Amino acid sequence: MGKDKFLRGAMILTLAGLMVKIIGSVNRILLSRLLGGEGIGLYQMAYPVYLLLLAISSAGIPVAISIIVSGYLAKQDYGNVRRVFHLSLAVMASLGLVLALLLVAGAGWLVDTGVIRDGRAYYALVALAPAVFFGTVLASFRGLFQGHQLMTPPAVSQILEQFIRVVTMIVLAYVLLPYGLEYAAAGAAFGAVPGSLLGMVVLGCFYHHYRKIWRQQYGDLQPREQLERGALVKRLLFLALPVSCANVLVPVTNSIDVLLVPGCLISSGLTVEQATTQFGYLAGMAQPLLLLATIPTISLATSLVPAISEAHALGKWDVIENKAATAVKLCCLLTLPAAVGMGVLAEPISRLLYGTGKAGVAMLHSAPALWFLGMHQVTTGVLQGMGYSALPMVHMLIGIGAKLAVLSPLTAGEYGIVGAAWATNINFGVTALLNILALGYYKITFRWYNIIRIMVAAALMGAVAVNVYAAAAVLGNVVAVVLAMAVAAAAYVLLLLLLGAVSKDELRHLPLVKKFCK
């Protein structure tokens, strides 16, 4: 039942993540047409500041709360669950208020000092301040529900938050556009405020509903383990700060590409225009597919943290190893065929999505990162659930160091954009490997013979995809790609069964197919 619970939670978060991405994509298209390049530029100058403040203030809190809450729930100590939530809520509300006021007060300074190059972005910065407060408070509610392994409330709030945010952005941008681009951009930025406010209200309603159930279920609300408030705050920060730092490192990694790759390409002999174009193929076309394809693994990691923490609190190492092995195997089942498919059909997929096949080279050589990144995310979830939240951050720093070491030699030489793609592969590969080695040190191992079978099935699937595409190419690129993917997917499932990589019992635990395997 425990396995079903965390897999069901991962599926719920995956579906929510896909819906949020779809809504966001529609918004990006509509807003770009409405504001144009200049207006979007003003919006994009302010929005990263908001994301950075959220990453600093609240990125690690849901993970930290879910770890502590699931640990206390495993011991039937609901009194301390309430204490942790109420304390985190007070801390996050105070921190969110301080950061929101800091953004309002510091917006002018960011413009005056040239950090924000265009002074017209000032209004968008100020408009985002309330969203910093609401988004920070929202993190406490999400951590509570994740700790209870209830993923539906956070999923529903994310979807509604994104929908209201997008509607408000488009409406305000349209209404304010006649008054100037700076006001339209500010209106678009303000969309984050009602979105995060609604998300907080929705989770508050869920909390009111579940609080009655929890009281009936746990009865005694007195903490069984008496901890001082300062000790609880210290533990929250101890778990949350490394996660927040790791989230800050994600834009740092992206910034490395922005700052170094174009210059390295120019050093390789390309003109400025050619270097910009090549960089666009990598950063604007290939890498976004990686992020889209790893939504399931992010969801799996999020759902895995409280499940592992619960088992860790009870000292059930066999359960930890079983859940970790299940999660890694599911990660491989999803990311390996996706990586192979993206690689062997890179040029046709590029033409299908972007109207040009020239991004195919960047997509082909970026494909391995899809598996490496998925493995990094899932193994990070296991380590965090065990309480070792600092290790993934350290491993990310080492991975970034490895990327910096190889980026210039690979990209400035004869390899060009291919070298830049492989520098990213090395980054994620090193990080994932270090996570796996750390888990091995704690006696958490995986069934590698099953993973090898999945690799073989994915490789054979890739051969099927190539041959089907070649045979169907006369029907046009769109039909050929769709047909190749469909036949390859069917062949992959059949190969998994023939090679013994999956069993009927394992399929039975997948929520979407459970009823067909009874």
Image (cartoon, rainbow, N blue to C red):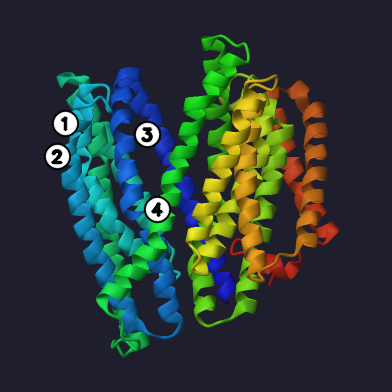
470 shown above or below 298? above
Q: Which mark is residue 108?
A: 1
Q: Kindly indicate whether the residue at mark 1 contacts the one at mark 2 (C-beta within 8 angstroms).
A: yes
Lower sequence index among marks 3 and 2 = 3
Q: How many neighbours does mark 1 have within 10 angstroms: few (below 14), some (14-19), or many (20 or more)?
A: some
Q: Which mark is residue 27?
A: 3
Which mark is nearer the camera, 3 or 1? 1
SS at mark 1 in the image: helix
Q: Kindly indicate whether the residue at mark 4 contacts the one at mark 1 (C-beta within 8 angstroms).
A: no
Q: How many neighbours does mark 4 have within 10 angstroms: few (below 14), some (14-19), or many (20 or more)?
A: many
Say what amino acid the circle numbered 1 marks.
Answer: Gly
Q: Which mark is residue 244?
A: 4
* x and y percentages locating residue 52 in the rendered image: 34, 42
Say what amino acid the circle numbered 2 marks.
Answer: Ala
The CA distance from mark 3 to mark 1 is 28 Å
* x and y percentages locating residue 82 in the rendered image: 29, 77
33 shown above or below 437? above
SS at mark 3 in the image: helix
Q: Residue at x 52, y 59 (%)?
A: 391
Q: Kindly indicate whether the residue at mark 2 contacts the one at mark 3 (C-beta within 8 angstroms).
A: no
366 shown above or below 220? above
Lower sequence index among marks 3 and 4 = 3
Q: In front: 123, or 173?
A: 123
